[in-house]
Image (spheres, rainbow, N blue to C red):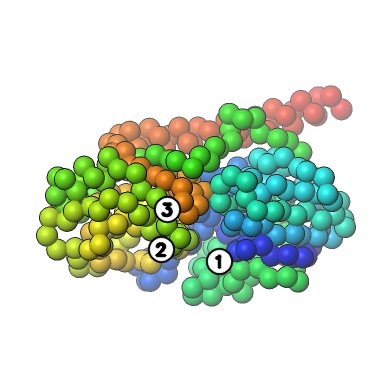
Amino acid sequence: MIKTIKPGLFTTVQDEGRWGYQAYGMPVAGAMDRYAYRLANHLAGNRKGAAVLEMTMLGGAFEFQNDCLVSICGADMQANLDGARVPNWSAFQVSAGSVLSFDYVAAGCRTYLAVRGGIKAPPVLGSRSTYTRAGVGGLEGRPLKAGDILQAGIDLGSGAQPATLPEQFTARYDQEQTLRVIMGPQDDMFTAGGIRTFLESKYTVSNEADRMGYRLEGPKIEHAGKADIISDALPEGAVQVPAHGMPIVMMADRQTTGGYPKIATVIGPDLSLLAQARPGDTVCFHSCSDEEALNILRSEEQRYFDVQRFLEELQYSAWTQC
């Protein structure tokens, strides 16, 4: 069992998300940074889709009442185990009675804490992800609070041992990011000048940036006419542009439909970078083709495979030395 001593600013249980229910009005939710989330589970030796803790901006403090293997990936929240610093992008053993604590982020925005076996929580529509606006999933559909008790689940995958990922597998969270997009589906509702503005300008992440969406500030994007459409489905990464001309990128907790034209959609692999952006950071957009986007996705999947192979080789080396 794991006792929550301090919950952090906004800490929730998340997994891959509640897919397949948008048609019924249920948002997907799930981990904002899918890359850091998946690597945390790889390091902990969990099955794909196991639930983890997602911490935002300020991490929590947790007392472990049993020996177990845990891992941390994503933003650097200066993790300490019983007062000793532990590296990010690593898995390590904790002993019964140990306290793992986190501070404010030094880089990035969201940190993922995985425990071997995953976080135990009752699935809602096939997912343990917390969607706070509806109060479903996770721990009573809410962020963690002091005194909450968490338990490890049984989502065990491959074997696991303490390890730190080499730099080639870690992510870098700069204060300026380029996000690749596929244009459309309503890019014809913007002037040529508006599209140039969108693709050639820098935008600043506003204070209105959360799990639902990131509102950006910068040069106004010009519509060709009206700035409304009949509401249609909102995919993750959709870039809506209301009448005020400022783009809004839809994230994990987005509503299921929207009535503003979508000038483009941020590709999946780059959404992890945006999920780690903080207010004041800047982003710019770069158009890519469907084929380019598919190749980028293939590269991301290859990295997951390479990480798993790296960890398996570590385990084999440790076994042969016994």
Q: Earlier in the sequence, mark 1 or mark 3?
A: 1
Amino acid at dot 3: Val
The quadrant of the picture occupied by the N terminus is bottom right
Residue 260 position in % (x across, y down): 25, 63
Q: Residue furthest left?
A: 225
Q: Quick one: label 2, few (<14), some, or many (20+) residues within 10 Å?
A: many
Label at residue 205: 3
Residue 228 position in % (x across, y down): 19, 65
Q: Earlier in the sequence, mark 3 or mark 2?
A: 3
* 191 on left or right of 111: left
Which residue lies at the image location 76% right of the left edge and 42% below the top edge? Answer: 86
Residue 15 image-quadrant placement: bottom right
Q: Earlier in the sequence, mark 1 or mark 2?
A: 1
Residue matched to label 2: 254
Label at residue 130: 1
Q: CA distance from mark 1 to mark 3?
A: 24 Å
Discs 3, 2 touching: Cβ within 8 Å: no
* 57 on left or right of 148: left
The quadrant of the picture occupied by the C terminus is top right
Q: Is residue 159 visible?
A: no
Q: SS of the residue at dot 1? A: loop
- Image label count: 3
Q: CA distance from mark 3 to mark 2?
A: 17 Å
As rendered, which of 263 and 289 lies closer to the eye? 263
Q: Quick one: label 3, few (<14), some, or many (20+) residues within 10 Å?
A: many
